[in-house]
Amino acid sequence: MDLTVTIGKRSLKNPVGLASGTFGYGGEYESLVDLSAVGALYTKTITPAPRAGNECPRIIETPSGLLNSIGLANVGVEVYIKEKLPALKDADCAIVANISGETEDGFGSVIGSLEECERIWGYEVNVSCPNVSRGGIAFGTDPGVVEHLTSRLRRITEKPLIVKLTPNVTDICAIARAAEAGGADAVSCINTVVGMVIDTEKKRPVLGSGTGGLSGPAIRPVGVAAVYRVKRAVSIPVIGLGGIMTGDDALQYLLAGAAAVQIGTATFVDPSAAIKVLQGIESYCRREGIKSIPELNALLE
């Protein structure tokens, strides 16, 4: 069985990754999870300068989901290089830096700073966070802006460039095609779905920022459908995420056409969820006599 996945000029040893924003910078889980078991770690979004994030409270559970409004709080690229990356020097998996910025220059400066870091396998470009007032969602909702940004970043790096898509648009396929036209090696979908919870006693939103991004099992059908549609709209690999809790959940994405998957909210329930998901995929492939991910992709009737 060969579960390797090729994205751009590089390969992942297996299709299971840990989603950005749910696994910190990686070092936080080092004593709990064997990182060598997963294909990739997508680290927490990094911006040019540190960000304090949004007003608290920032997170609340919902039926079959989690609503968050972190606001891309992070240490900034300089501290990321000096303190966070060295902690991952022994992690035997691909390190994908999830990056963002408020302007094209901001996105470019983060990649420019990280480009000489050998530990960085590739980049996931976050144009889809629903919890920032500038940048983020504004980039990911306009095909022209996505293509222009992607092509500009393409000129900076030869490492794999993955554009993370938002589901909060009329046509996610148009955004995916724009990323491909700009030179992306892959797209990942989906980011969180905009949601809101209201405290009926206080008569105001629970989250400090009002709305937030919904993740978890509640959005899995949205994610699977997005992957199914996007895979048929582009030629580059599609990475699926959104509500994957088990191996069977991941298999839905792979059958829909995903080349790889990411595990996010499930990690909060069980830090080793990604490893169990991988074991579930391997068990299914052995049982069905499947030898590769492309073979799995072709099975959906």
Image (tube, grey):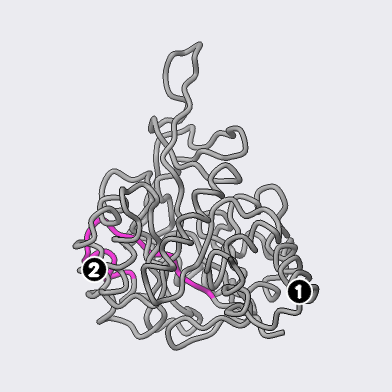
Asked if the magenta segment contains residue 100, the reply would be: yes
Give the number of the disc on residue 147. Answer: 2
Residue kind at label 2, given as amino acid type? Glu
Residues 246 and 96: in front is: 246
Left-right relation of 217 to 183: right
User: How many numbered marks are there?
Assistant: 2
Examine the rendered structure and indicate whether residue 80 appears above or below residue 57.
Answer: below
Pick the quarter of the image with the C terminus.
bottom right
Q: Position of residue 23 (x, y in %)?
A: 58, 58
Picture residue at 58% right of the left edge, 40% below the top: 65
Q: Magenta residues, as a range?
A: 95-110
Q: Residue furthest front?
A: 301
Residue 235 figure quarter: bottom left
Say which element carries label 1.
helix
Q: Horizontal placement of 175 versus 10: left or right?
A: left
Residue 209's spot in the image, x, y percent? 38, 33
Rounded to the nearest angstrom, the CA distance separating label 1 from label 2 is: 39 Å
* Residue at the extreme top: 201
Residue at screen point 56% across, 81% down: 5
Asked if the residue at tag 2 contacts the one at tag 1, i.e. Cβ–Cβ closer than 8 Å, the answer is no
Is the residue marked by circle 2 packed among few (<14), some (14-19), or many (20+) residues within 10 Å? many
Residue 177 is left or right of residue 290, and the answer is left
Q: Residue at x 27, y 53 (%)?
A: 141
According to the picture, the residue beneath numbered tag 1 turns out to be 288
Q: Nearer the viewer, residue 266 or 254?
A: 254
Residue 114 falls inside the magenta stretch: no
Looking at marks 1 and 2 on the same chain, the residue that comes earlier in the sequence is marked by: 2
